[in-house]
Amino acid sequence: MLLDFMELLENVKYINPKCFEDEKYKHSKKSDIYNFGVILWKISSGRPLFDKFSKRNEVLAIHILQGKREKPVEGTPNQYIQLYERCWDHNPN
């Protein structure tokens, strides 16, 4: 169990926050949609995700669980921003 949690922390930037909220949470299409939104932000920004957190993944996990996400990059089209924000919504549809 501890090893699984440590693996989650190593990949916290890309993992659906629901995995941290509920240990019984199963990977689903919604998880993939969340991940897709994260990747879309990364493509639009050209930067590493949450680079200000460096190696402090446990702090980052709390940050993400509080609903905080990366900010849109200036010059990104609004429709693109709306798409990835809908993907990484806490309850994506």
Image (spheres, grey):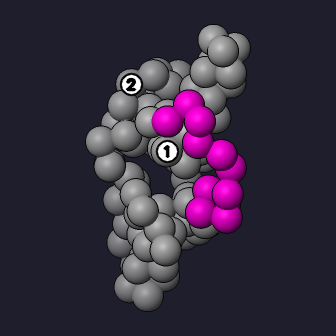
Mark number, residue 59: 2
Q: Amino acid at mark 1?
A: Lys
For image coordinates 47% across by 62% down, the residue present is 88
Mark number, residue 18: 1
Crowd band around label 2 with a 10 angstrom C-alpha radius: few (<14), some (14–19), many (20+): few
User: Based on the displayed image, in which of its 4 quarters is residue 12 positioned?
Assistant: top right
For image coordinates 49% across by 74% down, the residue present is 93
Residue 58 percent location from the top left of the image: 45, 22
Residue 5 percent location from the top left of the image: 61, 21
Q: Amino acid at mark 2?
A: Val
Circle 1: element type: helix
Q: Nearer the viewer, residue 41 or 52?
A: 41
Q: Which residues are magenta?
A: 22-32
Mark number, residue 50: none
Question: Does residue 25 show up magenta in the picture?
Answer: yes
- Magenta highlight: main SS: loop
Q: Is residue 82 visible?
A: yes
Q: How many marks?
A: 2
